[in-house]
Image: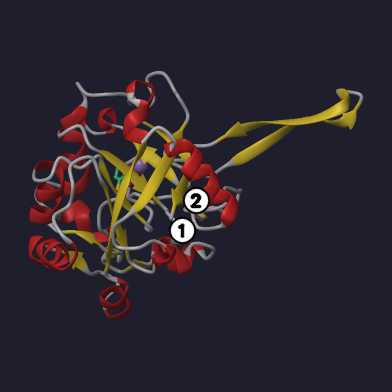
């Protein structure tokens, strides 16, 4: 296809190809993961002013940021987890992996009934029976409807007496995602790729353990997955090229 880029540009110009922003806005109000003691927690975004068209900078405004690598819509690199500690940091991720097809598993109806919904291997296989086998090199995205809560920290984190109640894969689905289809990674609308209850699973946080341990990536706090088809969208994931980084806030776009 000698004119593939020209065809894409024409599709963008005509509206036949749409750009969907899968990124949540990043502000001081963006909710962050809350781990129980004794674990350290990631800070939300905070900003300090350097200048505002004033004596510190007469014609310019700029700020200094403080935020976690895992604050807001973000990318998890393999070295984020102990199982992937010999793997890639964010800067080492090949750009071809950052432009890849997306498979969307929509379980928003199930999650509406059960916010602690666990995705199982049987459910992934049910999706494959309907939409075809997940192609190697794809992102798998779980559409849960959780993005509707993203502007309300309490509803988004959904902490109950037993800890957070949010959807995610069970242990065997996490193992499957890490090992069975050669996926690039797994992305979600919730604060982490693991279910809220996953700290009590064996292994703890299995999505992190099996994804990172197999060189796969994670994407969290995504928006607008409802606008994606089950297959056929193209994801563009842009984390900072942070040397030694375990993750990075990312702009995530889909071409539909
Ligand atoms: C550290 C420990 C547990 C979790 C996480 C980080 C994340 O969700 C993350 O942002 O990678 S669940
Ligand atoms: Mn993370």
Q: Quadrant of residue 213?
A: top left
Inter-mark Cα distance, 1 to 2: 6 Å
169 lies above or below 236: below
Looking at the picture, how far across and down is residue 22, in whole percent? 47, 53
Identify the residue under disc 1. 223
Looking at the picture, how far across and down is residue 180, in whole percent? 8, 45
- Name the residue located 13 percent from the left edge and 55 percent from the top edge: 133
Q: Secondary structure at mark 2?
A: loop
Residue nearest the viewer, comparing 201 with 61: 61
- Name the residue located 29 percent from the left edge and 32 percent from the top edge: 80
| C-beta proximity under 8 Å, tags 1 and 2 | yes
Residue nearest the viewer, comparing 99 with 120: 99
- Name the residue located 22 percent from the left edge and 24 percent from the top edge: 87
Looking at the picture, how far across and down is residue 84, in whole percent? 19, 29
Label drawn at residue 23: 2
Q: Residues within 10 Å of mark 2 (few under 14, many from 20)?
A: many
Colour setup of the view: secondary structure
Q: Secondary structure at mark 1?
A: loop
- Name the residue located 20 percent from the left edge and 32 percent from the top edge: 215
Question: Along the horizontal axis of the image, is 62 left or right of 135?
Answer: right
């Amino acid at each position: 296809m000698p004119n593939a880029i020209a065809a894409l540009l024409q599709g963008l110009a005509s509206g036949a190809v749409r750009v969907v922003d899968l990124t949540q806005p990043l502000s001081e109000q963006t909710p962050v993961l809350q781990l129980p003691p004794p674990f350290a927690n990631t800070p939300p975004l905070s900003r300090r002013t350097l200048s505002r068209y004033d004596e510190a900078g007469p014609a310019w405004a700029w700020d200094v940021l403080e935020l976690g690598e895992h604050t807001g819509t973000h990318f998890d690199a393999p070295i984020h987890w102990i199982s992937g500690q010999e793997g890639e940091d964010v800067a080492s991720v090949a750009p071809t992996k950052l432009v890849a097809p997306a498979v969307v598993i929509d379980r928003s109806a199930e999650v509406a009934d059960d916010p602690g919904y666990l995705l199982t291997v049987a459910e992934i296989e049910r999706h494959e029976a309907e939409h075809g086998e997940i192609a190697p090199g794809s992102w798998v995205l779980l559409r849960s409807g959780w993005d509707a809560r993203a502007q309300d920290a309490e509803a988004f984190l959904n902490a109950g007496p037993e800890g957070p109640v949010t959807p995610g894969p069970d242990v065997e689905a996490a193992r499957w995602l890490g090992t069975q289809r050669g996926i690039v990674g797994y992305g979600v609308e919730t604060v982490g790729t693991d279910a809220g209850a996953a700290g009590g699973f064996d292994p703890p946080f299995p999505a992190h353990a099996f994804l990172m341990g197999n060189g796969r990536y994670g994407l969290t706090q995504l928006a607008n997955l409802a606008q994606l088809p089950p297959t056929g969208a193209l994801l563009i994931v842009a984390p900072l090229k942070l040397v030694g980084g375990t993750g990075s806030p990312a702009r995530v776009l889909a071409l539909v």
